Amino acid sequence: MKLLPLVTICALFFISCDDPSLDQQGDVDEIVDPIENLMELSSIQIAQGTFNNVTDNIDLVYNNDGLVAQVLFTGTTSVSYNMEYASNNRLETITKVDVNTVIYNFTYDEDFVLVNFTDSNGDEVEMQLFTDTQNRINRVLTTVTDVSGVATQSEDLRYLYNANFNVDRINSLAFNGFTVNAYSELTYEFNNNPFRDMNDVLRLLIFPEFVPYTRYVPITRENFTAASSSFTLENSFSFIYTLREDEFPSSREVVKTESGVSTTTFEIFNYL
């Protein structure tokens, strides 16, 4: 399933547990241990084919408040993201710099976060990140207004959570808001998410390929697209983890299968 807006624009698509702008609450049916020490990623290396064939590096820089101030992609992808926060730790702007410079502005409402930016084509893009009663982002609605003033809904994604705060399914809806034209299904086993203490909006927008918006990280993902009166499997992913003693991954092997062909990528996680 192809996820467009900022997800695609960011080169690949919540607030930290103590961030007042989108506090995540614990499960009703599960006792959650308090987080004594924040888990902060320092970098991620991506290797193609073999573990030692590193082709990309992602570096994360934190400010004095422990918030991500900069994300740097180098290698086959060269792009930087610079974050600015308000005094209450709410994300105010992201400045993306590659060939062009794009500034993403954030406005907060009771039930959603509004993201506005002008893309490289000069089109005005508006993303609404809706939250549910648990303050989790459960819908992303994107509208693009071209230079002539014509507005078009480009994407409507719905995130369905299970009792463990993991996304079981992502539905991509047609413009009528009812018809599902593509969806993803994910499965999990118990491990810890290396992105768990990161700003929720950053997790969703900048790191979509890592599926960072869940409590745990997935072991499988299958993406389906509509075909006639049914759905066809477009591609699938399987994830094999090497875990540290604290159940956070030190690396994972990602196997993507599409049209009968499988490719392998390795991701190495480094922490502060």
Image (cartoon, rainbow, N blue to C red):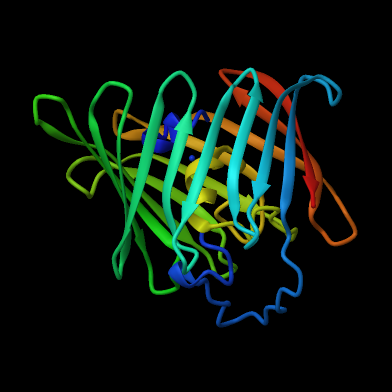
Give left or right: position of 57 versus 174.
right
- Asked whether the viewer can see residue 241, the reply is no
Q: Toward the viewer: 53 or 176?
A: 53
Whole-percent x, y for residue 78 in the image: 59, 22
The image shows residue 209, relative to residue 52, as above or below, that is: below
Residue drawn 57% across and 64% down?
A: 16
Residue drawn 53% across and 76% down?
A: 25
Q: Toward the viewer: 167 or 69?
A: 69
The image shows residue 81, relative to residue 216, as above or below, that is: above
Whole-percent x, y for residue 183 in the image: 42, 42
Quadrant into which the N terminus falls: top left
Q: Toward the viewer: 225 or 130?
A: 130
Give left or right: position of 93 versus 217.
left
Residue at the far left in the pictured view: 149
Splitting the image into 4 quarters, where does residue 149 fall?
A: top left
Splitting the image into 4 quarters, where does residue 109 fall?
A: bottom left
- Asked whether the viewer can see residue 88, the reply is yes
Whole-percent x, y for residue 87 in the image: 47, 66
Residue drawn 47% across and 44% down?
A: 205
Give left or right: position of 258 versus 50.
left
Whole-percent x, y for residue 68 in the image: 60, 51
